[in-house]
Each structure stands twice: as C-alpha cells, then as structure tokens.
Image (tube, rainbow, N blue to C red):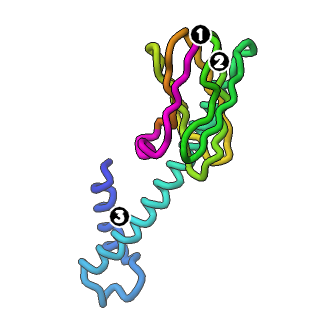
Amino acid sequence: MSIKTFCSCVTVAAWFCGSVPGRAEDKTAGEKTSEVWEKTKTKTKDISHQVAETTRHVADDVENAIAKPDADARKVEVTITDTGAQVARTLKAGKTAFVVTNRGKERHNFEIEGNSLEKRFWLGIAANDTKTLQVDLKPGTYEADCGIKEHTGREQKVKLTVK
C-alpha cells in the first residue's frame, strides 16, 4: 500500500469516525482532513526516524561483527579529524587492518583506493568511535581519505606507498 493510499484511508476513517478532536460539527471536511494529515505527517516522520536509527545500529553491529581483523593482519593506526586522515605513508604489502579512530566532531568514513582496490566502511564512523577495516594491500600507490562526498575539498587525501 502506498503512503498516499494509507493517508487517504486514515483521513476517511477519521472523518467517518469523528476521531478528530474538537467539535466535529463545527469543522468542515477540509479542516478535518488537514488535522488528520498533520497528525499523519508527524507520526510518519517519527516512525521514519526510529526506523533509520535502528537500521543504522543494526548495520553498525553487522559491520563490527564481520570487520574483526585476522590475527595475522598487520595493524595500522589511522586518526581521522575534520581536516583529514593521519596514517603512515609507507606500508608493507599483505593483510593490513586499518584501526581507524574518528577524532573529529562530525561523522567521517575511511576509504582506501588504488591498484584495483576500493574499500570503505558501509556506514561512517561516529565522532570518538573506532572501527577496523581489513584489506590485502598489493605493492603500489593508494589514496586514503574520508570518502564522504560532502567533505570533498575540506579534507586532504593521503597518498600511501605499499612495498
């Protein structure tokens, strides 16, 4: 059922049942419809926010569960701020677990690209949160940055050399 159909059903039901507050006989059908519509919009918005927040938490939990690095992966500390990422510029090839901590005030992400590799977190990293991203680095040149389009130009990209 579409949202439009749902809203129409709610409006008609409220109108027929007289569930609109106030003296029903003093209100026109348009006024009743408007009141029900406003309540429906508010309730829909509240429910949408709850669903989005729950989805974000579930996705974070799933991402954290599958992002546990292999025991033999080399750990590389990364600090993300509102101006860019701080990470070692030269790395060894092989399994690498980037342990990324967001020290900025905003939600950020961490993305690494190069040598046919493009990997990032499904969801960003909240301020003062830490996540781990494991990749298998091949020798070559890579770029690392936040990866959030709205942050492009505000943050510096970091060039990494893998040997």
Read off the residue under disc 1.
Answer: 163
**Horizontal side of residue 18 vs 147, given as left or right:** left
Q: Is residue 78 above or below residue 21?
A: above
**Mark 2, residue position:** 96
Report the mark closest to the observer, 1 or 2.
1
Quadrant location of the C terminus? top right
CA neighbours of label 3 inside 10 A, class few (<14), some (14 to 19), many (20+): some
The residue shown at (42%, 43%) is: 153
- Tell me the SS state at disc 3: helix
Q: Amino acid at mark 1?
A: Lys
Spatial CA distance of label 3 from label 2 is 55 Å
Q: Quadrant of residue 37?
A: bottom left
Q: Magenta stretch containing residue 151, yes or no?
A: yes
- Graded by Cα atoms within 10 Å as few (under 14), some (14 to 19) or many (20 or more), the crowding at tag 1 reads few
Q: Position of residue 76 (x, y in %)?
A: 68, 25
Q: Do the CB atoms of the residues marked 3 and 2 lie less than 8 Å apart?
A: no
Residue drawn at x 39%, y 78% as measured from the top left: 20
Give the distance between the C-alpha atoms of the residues marked 1 and 3, in whole angstroms: 64 Å
Q: Secondary structure at mark 1?
A: loop
Instruction: Give the camera-side residue of 115 and 33.
Output: 115
Residue at the spot of label 3: 10
Indicate the position of residue 151 as horizontal and vertical percent values: 45, 45
Q: Quadrant of residue 45?
A: bottom left
| Amino acid type, residue under disc 3 in the picture | Val
At label 2, the amino acid type is Thr
Q: Give the SS element for disc 2.
A: strand
Q: Which residues are magenta?
A: 148-162
**Could you tell which of marks 1 and 3 lies nearer the N-terminus?**
3
Q: Specify which label sits upstream in the sequence, 3 or 2.
A: 3
How far apart, in angstroms, are the residues tagged by discs 1 and 2?
Answer: 13 Å
